[in-house]
Image (spheres, rainbow, N blue to C red):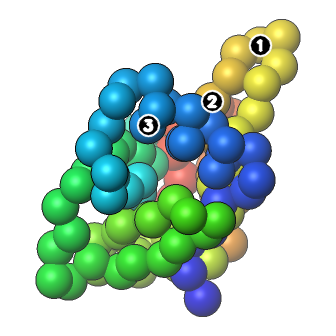
């Protein structure tokens, strides 16, 4: 299994990379950190440095990087991008989460 992106998420990542003039080879780094209302919070960022221990996946030309500890919690996760009247942002569908908070930004296992 791996961490994957929906088509909408791929398009948004490409848009951000282009809009911010990030260098070729820039990847989306996905991770978790302690905190949030349910125990863990998702993290997203851009990185042009691959670490030897990173889990690497590519979806439609977008490279996804994840450190090994975060990957234990995120393996099988799908990252989507949503736009609605309430706002816009990335949404995580994580099969490893036993409970998520109402905002969808944190989870527990």
Task: Determine which residue is flagged by label 2.
Answer: 89
| Pointers 2 and 1 in contact (C-beta within 8 Å) | no
Label 3 Cα neighbours within 10 Å, binned few <14 / some 14-19 / many ≥20: some
Q: Is residue 76 above or below residue 94?
A: below
Q: Secondary structure at mark 3?
A: helix
- Taking the image as shown, residue 82 lies to the left or right of residue 99, namely right
Which is closer to the viewer, label 3 or label 1? 3
Task: Determine which residue is flagged by label 3.
Answer: 17
The residue depicted at 36 percent of the width and 80 percent of the height is: 55
Indicate the position of residue 75 as horizontal and vertical percent values.
53, 78
**Front position in the image: 33 or 82:** 82
Label 2 Cα neighbours within 10 Å, binned few <14 / some 14-19 / many ≥20: few
The CA distance from mark 2 to mark 1 is: 10 Å
The residue depicted at 61 percent of the width and 68 percent of the height is: 59
Indicate the position of residue 4 as horizontal and vertical percent values.
62, 68
In the picture, the disc for residue 77 is none
Q: Secondary structure at mark 1?
A: loop
The CA distance from mark 3 to mark 1 is: 24 Å
Residue 94 seen in render: no
Q: Total number of numbered labels?
A: 3
Name the quadrant containing residue 27.
Answer: bottom left
Task: Determine which residue is flagged by label 1.
Answer: 86
Indicate the position of residue 32 as horizontal and vertical percent values.
36, 56
**Front position in the image: 14 or 90:** 14
Residue 82 seen in render: yes
Q: Secondary structure at mark 2?
A: strand
Indicate the position of residue 62 as horizontal and vertical percent values.
52, 60
Which is closer to the viewer, label 2 or label 1? 2
Q: Earlier in the sequence, mark 2 or mark 3?
A: 3
Q: Is residue 73 above or below residue 2?
A: above
């Amino acid at each position: 299994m791996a961490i994957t992106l929906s088509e909408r998420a791929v398009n948004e990542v490409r848009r951000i990379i282009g809009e911010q003039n990030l260098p070729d080879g820039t990847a989306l780094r996905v991770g978790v950190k302690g905190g949030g209302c349910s125990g863990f919070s998702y993290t997203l960022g851009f990185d042009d440095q691959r670490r030897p221990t990173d889990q690497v996946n590519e979806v439609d030309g977008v490279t996804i990087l994840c450190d090994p500890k975060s990957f234990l919690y995120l393996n099988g996760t799908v990252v989507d991008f949503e736009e609605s009247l309430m706002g816009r942002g990335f949404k995580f569908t994580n099969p490893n989460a036993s409970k998520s908070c109402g905002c969808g930004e944190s989870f527990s296992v």
